[in-house]
C-alpha cells in the first residue's frame, strides 16, 4: 500500500481502534468526526479510505495499524502525535470499556512514540 499522509494515517488508526473490539459505537464515530474536523479545514471524500478499510481482513489490522502509525510519525510533529494520542485514548474509552485488544494497540502507539511526547 502507498504511503498515507498523516491525516489519512490517523483516520485509518482510529477506524481500526473503533473496530477491534468487534463493535462500532456511535460515540466512537463522534471521536472520528471530531478528529477529521480538527485535521481537515475542508470537506474530504473518504469513500476510497472506507473501501480500503472494509476490504482489510481483521487479521491484518495490526500490520495496517503499524504502517499507518509509521506514516503518521514521518509527517507529524511531536505535538501532533500527542494530540493524536489523545484522540486514540478517547476512541477506546468512548464505549466505556477498554478491551485487551484495544489496550494492545494503544500500548503500541505509546511505546513507539514515547520519546516524542515526554518533552511536550
Image: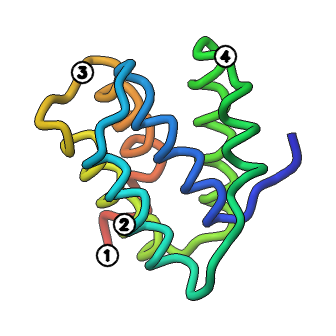
The N terminus sits in image quarter: top right
Q: Is residue 81 above or below residue 88?
A: below
Secondary structure of the residue carrying numbered label 4:
loop
Q: Which mark is drawn over residue 82?
A: 2
- Which of these two is toward me, 40 or 112? 40
Q: What residue is shown with label 3?
A: 99
Q: Which mark is drawn over residue 57?
A: 4
- Corner quadrant of residue 53: top right
Secondary structure of the residue carrying numbered label 3:
loop
Characterize the local packing of mark 2: few (<14), some (14-19) or many (20 or more) Cα atoms within 10 angstroms.
some
Mark 2 vs mark 3, CA separation in Å: 22 Å
**Pointer 1 and pointer 2: residues touching (CB < 8 Å)?**
yes
Secondary structure of the residue carrying numbered label 2:
helix
- Which of these two is toward me, 45 or 20? 45
Mark 1 vs mark 3, CA separation in Å: 28 Å
Q: What residue is shown with label 1?
A: 120
Measured as percent of width and height from the top left, residue 103 is found at 29, 28
- Which of these two is toward me, 25 or 74? 25
Amino acid at each position: 500500500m502507498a504511503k498515507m499522509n498523516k491525516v489519512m494515517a490517523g483516520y485509518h488508526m482510529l477506524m481500526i481502534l473503533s473496530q477491534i473490539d468487534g463493535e462500532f459505537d456511535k460515540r466512537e464515530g463522534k471521536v472520528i468526526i471530531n478528529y477529521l474536523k480538527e485535521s481537515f479545514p475542508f470537506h474530504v471524500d473518504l469513500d476510497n479510505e472506507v473501501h480500503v478499510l472494509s476490504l482489510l481482513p481483521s487479521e491484518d489490522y495490526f500490520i495496517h495499524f503499524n504502517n499507518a502509525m509509521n506514516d503518521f510519525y514521518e509527517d507529524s510533529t511531536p505535538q501532533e502525535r500527542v494530540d493524536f494520542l489523545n484522540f486514540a485514548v478517547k476512541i477506546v474509552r468512548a464505549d466505556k470499556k477498554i478491551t485487551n485488544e484495544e489496550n494492545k494497540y494503544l500500548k503500541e502507539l505509546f511505546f513507539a512514540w514515547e520519546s516524542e511526547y515526554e518533552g511536550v
